[in-house]
Amino acid sequence: MARSASDGTIARVRGALRSGDFRRLFAIRLAGQAGDGCFQAALVASVVFAPTEHSTTVGLFKAALITALPFSLLGPFVGVFIDRWSRRRILALAPLLKVAFVGLVLFDPVRQAVPFYLGALVVLSINRFYLATASAVVPRLVPVEDLLMANSLATVGGTLALLVGVFVGGKIAGAVGSTPVVVIAGAGWLAAAAIATRIRSDLAPMAIRGPAAALQNEVRRVVAEMVDGARMLVRTPRAIGPITSITLDQVGQGVILTLALVVFRDVFGAGVGSFSNVVGAGGIGVLAGIASIGALEGRFSKEQIVASAFVIGGMALVLTGAYLRGWSILVASFVVGLTFAWKKIPVDTMVQEALPDGYRGRVFSVYDVFYTSARIVAAAIAIALVPLLGTRGSVILIGMVFLVWAPVLPRWVGGVPDIRLVFAEGGRAEEWPRALRWGAAEEPVEVVRSWLEERGGERRRCFRLSLQDGTILDVSRLEPAGNWTIDREREDQATG
């Protein structure tokens, strides 16, 4: 029996975990991403906190480059391969391949740079395929009514496991060195591989788009669609505005993380355990933000939430820069993590709402490249900022940038309607729309239903529209001449 959104959270969690194969996939995410967290802690310990590394900023730039590059370059193309290869085999073999190459990270990153960085890049590149596959197979393991909760469990559980791995791995690396941390990471990956072999469901794609010989054409298609997505994004203010905001946030967060490590390592003489503390404080902030965003969305518009998050985060950073202490940095990390969740969740939703479903995949591919590349840019900026302004001045500068940016997004998107309806005869009230302009796209529509209703004492004109891809939209506007807005989006059950 289908469960509605009003069902209790515990009941919905139990429903998602009823599938034995999803429980195994969930265990894979926990074990594998805990190993990933330990691996990242070992990387930071070797590259940023190594005694031979003279500059903390340069060390963190190297770490950011290693961790973000595979996601930026490979991300858009991952789907082409996981739709052709055996997904169950990827889940079982990818962790073993990571174990095979992770030993290279035990080399000296200064004297034996080639094997060290090669090993790190290979492990993280394999991980990009692995995580994408783990996300892609969820709909094959749970019924449709449990899909939302299953995705939430997998994402939140995996993120928590990653943060715990980073925190614990950093503490261990600070106490006894990186080697035990790498061993623990390998053990987590071996456990994930063993669990994957017990999945009984057939995880093969429903349909392969073509023979293996057409793979080159598929890669070309991905490039063409990314270019198309970039063009669509530039012409859609309600999408490019939020993406610009979250990219700026990521650059600022990356600079702050670098500055925090500069203070702990160069000023306080702390080790890699301080990295664990910063990540732990930020992680707790993110969880608090995820837990509280629902209450905020019921009271404020999405752009107002993002603007307020920039104000709160900016003020915290300005105050931290004025009073730079170990505890104040951890408080700032918590606030930055909290406000990140208040930005990221509304931003993702705004981008989704700004575009028809047929364009979301390619636009989110472009979004992903910007998002993951921001930390590399941030680390590079920090290299220049620290000698120029010092740590205090740099923290205050980022805080000021956040404060200045706060009113930009509401003004950027505030005057832009969600959608526009196109009428044959100029839009008189008795006519029905023939097309819908959604972002930069124009979609032909068929009217399923038309009605008038009262909401909160206001009269609204409403249409139920059917798009060619099977999407059903309920749209409305305040009479007599308000902006059209999307009230509901769903798939046509007759076609879906």
Image (cartoon, rainbow, N blue to C red):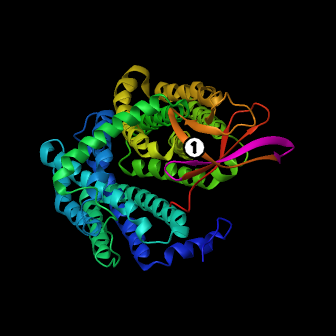
Which residue, as the protein is rendered here, is positioned at the far right?
Answer: 457
Tell me residue 443's x, y (percent): 52, 39
Amino acid type, mark 1: Val
Q: Is residue 466 above or below residue 179?
A: above
Pointer 1 residue: 445
Q: Residue 12 occupies which quadrant of the picture?
A: bottom right
Part of the protein shown in magenta: 454-470
Side of 277 where 198 appears, left or right: left
Q: Is residue 468 magenta?
A: yes
**Residue drawn at (24%, 41%), measured in percent from left and top?**
220
Tell me residue 382's x, y (percent): 38, 29
Q: Is residue 425 above or below residue 91?
A: above
Tell me residue 363's x, y (percent): 43, 40
Q: Is residue 293 above or below residue 375?
A: below
User: How many residues crowd mark 1 within 10 Å: few (<14), some (14–19), many (20+)?
Assistant: many
- Which residue occupies the foreground of this view, 203 or 33? 203
**Residue drawn at (46%, 35%), measured in percent from left and top?**
247
**Residue drawn at (26%, 70%), measured in percent from left and top?**
190
Q: Is residue 203 magenta?
A: no
- Which residue occupies the foreground of this view, 257 or 322? 257
Magenta: main secondary structure equals: strand
Tell me residue 294's x, y (percent): 65, 53
